[in-house]
Image (cartoon, grey):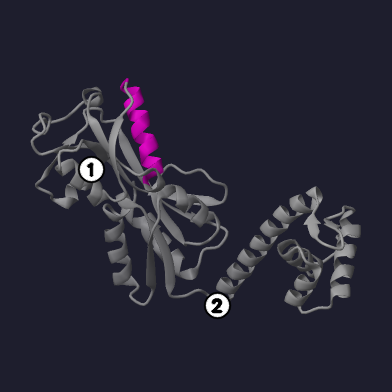
Amino acid sequence: MNFRFDLRHLRAFLAVAEALHFKRAAETLCITQPALSRLIKGLEESIEAKLFSRTTRQVELTEAGRLFLAECQQAFTHFERGIHLAQRATEGDIGHIAVAYNDFSINGVLPRILDLFKEKHPDISIELVYMPSHEQHNAIQNHDIDVGFLIGPLALEGIETHRSARERIVVILPKRHPLAERGSVRMEELADEKFILGTESGWREFRDYVFRMCMQAGFTPKILQEASTSSGIFGLVAANMGVSLYSECVEKFKREDIAIVPLAEREHTIETIAAWNTAYISPSFSLLRDLLQSELKI
């Protein structure tokens, strides 16, 4: 499109929209107030819309101005992201990888992968960030991280995924629970139990999965307590506050105060995936991606 305005006009518009005062906006931009007024007038003429309602006492955004502001803010976010990616590409971004993980991945396959990678590439630093699965979606799209380990599946444009684990769902019970010595437990047998689940803010994806499992078994789970961490969930179960569901990677915790019993329904599994944005892959992450694809043939 042949725009008749440039970034100077947009920066002027954003400054006035933020300050709602032409003099203060001009001072922020280090230009004169008449020059600022000319930029705003030129922008309004270019897009054929009045953006501000201006009187001697106050400046307000028109409805057109409010709509234009929202789109301009998004545009500048994309500009900043493009600059960031261009700088990373120019610098080669050698030596650093940002990795996000959730509870299942850090207690499952991820430590082994990172250990193998550090052995092969000791000079590449790895920044580990705990992040719930649903928050990783945006982080991957926005290039805030190089790779995320989260609950799958995930289908987003421009995002490539690789399965890192598929594990059975198990029941976590207090040690003296009547079902604790069983070889397996059917979902329907948990209908009258009190459940301990992760919080909505940190465990949204898995909570949704647990609810679907329970609904398929003919009941809605009665949630007695919530915890933000895996250890908090296990501690509440050990205190006989209720039961919970988790990935079979819980067996690595070696706790003596809880019982871990597989579900009889073997189709109930949880998938952990590695996911990354294909728009930019740093030289460092390409090495980790190659290791993931060679080591995790699931």
Q: Which mark is residue 248?
A: 1
**Residue 6 coordinates in the image, percent (x, y):** 81, 67
Using residue 218 as the reference point, say whether residue 281 is left or right of it.
right
Residue appearing at x 71%, y 63% in the figure: 18
**Residue 56 coordinates in the image, percent (x, y):** 87, 63
Residue 136 showing in the rendered view: yes
**Is 164 situated above or below 121?**
above
Q: Nearer the viewer, residue 57 or 72?
A: 57
Using residue 24 as the reference point, say whether residue 294 is left or right of it.
left
| Sequence-wise first label, 2 or 1 | 2
Which quadrant would the N terminus be assigned to in this image?
Answer: bottom right
Q: Which mark is residue 91?
A: 2
Q: Nearer the viewer, residue 1 or 158?
A: 1
Q: Amino acid at mark 1?
A: Glu
Residue 273 showing in the rendered view: no
Residue appearing at x 47%, y 75% in the figure: 94
Q: Nearer the viewer, residue 186 or 167?
A: 186
**Residue 185 coordinates in the image, percent (x, y):** 18, 28
Using residue 258 as the reference point, say whether residue 81 is left or right of it.
right
**Is 139 situated above or below 23?**
above
Q: In the image, which is nearer the foreground, mark 2 or mark 1?
A: 1
Label 1 packing within 10 angstroms: few (<14), some (14-19), many (20+): many
Magenta stretch: give its range.
Answer: 203-218
Q: Amino acid at mark 2?
A: Glu
Label 2 packing within 10 angstroms: few (<14), some (14-19), many (20+): few
